[in-house]
Image (cartoon, grey):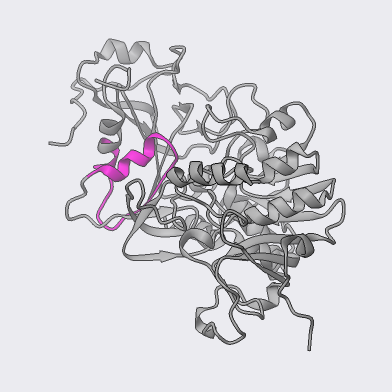
Amino acid sequence: MPKSKIYPSFAEAVADIPDGAVIGFGGFAVVGMPINLYEALAKQGAKGLTCVSNGTRGGSTMPSDAPTMESLIGNDQVKKVICSFTAPTRASQKLVFSEYYEKGLIEAELVPQGTLAERMRAAGAGIPAFYTPAAVGTELAEGRETRVFHGREYLLEEALPLDYAFIRAWQADAFGNLRFRRSQRNFNPLMAMAAKVTIVEVEEDILPVGAIDPDDVHLPGIFVHRLVKIPPPPEGWWPQRPAEIAKLEAERSAR
Amino acid sequence: MSDGAKGLTRQQMCDRLAMEFEDGWVVNLGIGIPTLCSNFDFGDKQIVFHAENGVIGYGPLTGAGKEDLHLVNAGGQHVTLNPGAAIVHHADSFGMIRSGRIDVTVLGAYEVAENGDFANWKMAGQKGGGIGGAMDLAACAKHVFVAMEQVTRNGRPRLVERCAIPVTAKGVVDLVITNYGLFAITPEGMALREIAPGVSIDEVKATVGCNLLIPREVPPVRLRT
């Protein structure tokens, strides 16, 4: 029997992450963000990390004290961020990331969102590089290889392999077959396919092997290595409706 | 007039662009002003809203307290799903974009040039910026519409001869709505197509930074009746 993929805690699931690891963090606008794994990695303390994520902060359903990539950056754990936003989407928002980046305390590689997704898809599909029309003629393409196909110019982009993927899923069986709910899928399966080791925080109780119909599996367990069930709030981190966030924050601070 | 600016309201601006959407079109709306296009009453037209995060066929926003915490559009807004909706991951979502399945994207912008270049991801002198899906969409959607204010907060023109800040894509914009009017990018240059009520031709000319093709008769911007 191979070792069980089910880990009893987030701390144990991230215990071996070394300094300098390249880690992809799934999620988009809070949905599918591995909030509990962010917290575990912040406590674990690995440094010099390269972090891949669409952005560094969530949205209105993220509890304001919830850990995000902002926490890792503020802890000085991050060397470089690969993302599609270094600046907040609203001028009124302030990001630790933007502040660190503007002061030169952190590196950033800004990538168009579709290119970011495809670079990880390519890594997971055994494709070393591909050509895309996105960013042709822009500052991002300066000094880089382009090629004309059928009369149109394309930019060469390389695959983005990851050491680890941290993702969040709705359902999992013990083999690691995953299902996502609604817009939770986003970058999550792509990061898992690009990674050597995929760690998943799971919303529902982990099911016995075979409980998910093969036709309904969104990401096969061969791409998944570690599973942790998210405890109910306030112990575990869950997105909340804005009205509920204030109540939970009060409970947490009373603990 | 509202939103503290002269001419069209932001909703009127988006309504005018939404009138251009054709039956059956797949539409992607950028963050900010463009999201208002989904409030337009499309009547019998079937319009499919595509979001970069893989939600194909989303519907109206949910009310407070009714949010599905697993479902947002690309602006992070909690939306509903229309009958026939589908969910894909990010790579498939952008595959649809790059392979030309998106009929129109409506984006915000800092500047649009008379040759169809536009800039919306970083401001002058800014380190880094916010690209999101704009470069993929701008390069690949069949039509690129822009919704933005006529001038910057400091009164500087946004419709310009050449973009002064780094572009998002070159030569892609078809149509621009501002609070002052509707503008088309043509092979001959930037053309004023319709003018907002309460705005004069001279005011339009004084607030652009490029040559403007102005027909003898400029109709008023068509508004929802």
Q: Is residue A140 magenta?
A: no
Q: What stretch of residues is rendered in magenta?
A: B16-40
Q: Is residue A142 above or below residue B182?
A: below
Specify the quadrant of the image occupied by residue B153: top left
Which residue does the image show at 64% across and 37% down from the upper left?
A86
Q: Is residue B194 above or below residue A1?
A: above
For residue A100, side relative to residue A94 (left or right): right
Q: Position of residue A160 (x, y in %)?
A: 73, 57
Res. B99 visible in picture: no
Q: Position of residue B78 (x, y in %)?
A: 40, 50
Which residue does the image show at 82% across and 60% down from the upper left?
A15
Q: Is residue B30 above or below residue A213?
A: above
Q: Is residue A239 above or below residue A14?
A: above
Q: Quadrant of the N terminus of chain A?
A: bottom right
**Could you say which is closer to the camera, residue A13 or residue A243?**
A243
In this view, the residue farthest toward the left is B225
For residue A216, side relative to residue A22 (left or right): left
Res. A213 visible in picture: yes
**Could you say which is closer to the camera, residue B15 or residue B69?**
B69
**Could you say which is closer to the camera, residue B129 or residue A61?**
A61
In this view, the residue farthest toward the front is A254
Q: Position of residue A153 (x, y in %)?
A: 60, 49
Q: Is residue B37 magenta?
A: yes
Q: How many dots with numbers?
A: 0
Which residue does the image show at 84% across and 50% down from the upper left?
A46
For residue A157, side relative to residue B109 (left or right): right
Specify the quadrant of the image occupied by residue A232: bottom right
Q: Position of residue A132 (x, y in %)?
A: 61, 53
For residue A210, side relative to residue B51 (left or right): right
